[in-house]
Image: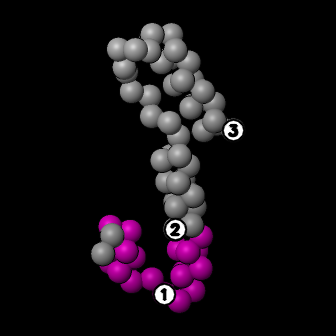
Amino acid sequence: MTSLEQMEAQLKLAPEQQGLWSVYRDRLDAYAQQFYRERPVLPTPQQPAPAQIGRLVMNLQNRLA
């Protein structure tokens, strides 16, 4: 079981709450997909610091959009 499934089991949601839980789960999945789609900003000796900062700014701008 994933932790989200465990949380759902512990909440013991009523049938009328399942719709809202489904919306929450879908939004969380969409956020996770977006998060992992972004290029990580890891320092490398080949890339100068201004380029690393530029990539970080680009990732943050994409997140805000």
In the image, what residue occupies the spot 60% across and 38% down? 63
In primary-sequence order, the first of circles 2 and 1 is 1
In primary-sequence order, the first of circles 2 and 3 is 2
Residue 65 numbered tag: 3
Query: At which x and y percent is residue 28?
Result: 52, 60
Query: Is the C-beta separation of discs 2 and 1 under 8 Å?
Result: no
Magenta run includes residue 15: yes
Query: At which x and y percent is residue 49?
Result: 44, 11
Q: Secondary structure at mark 1?
A: loop
Query: At which x and y percent is residue 33?
Result: 53, 54
Instruction: List the residue tagged with mark 2.
Output: 25
Residue range in magenta is: 3-23
Along the viewing direction, whichever of 20 and 2 lies nearer the viewer: 2
Kind of residue sitting beneath label 1: Ala
Residue 21 shows in this picture: yes
In the image, what residue occupies the spot 56% across and 32% down? 59
State the predominant SS element of the stretch in magenta. helix
Q: Secondary structure at mark 3?
A: loop
Can you say whether 6 is above or below 41 in the image? below
Along the viewing direction, whichever of 47 and 65 lies nearer the viewer: 47
Horizontal side of 33 relative to 12 (left or right) equals: right
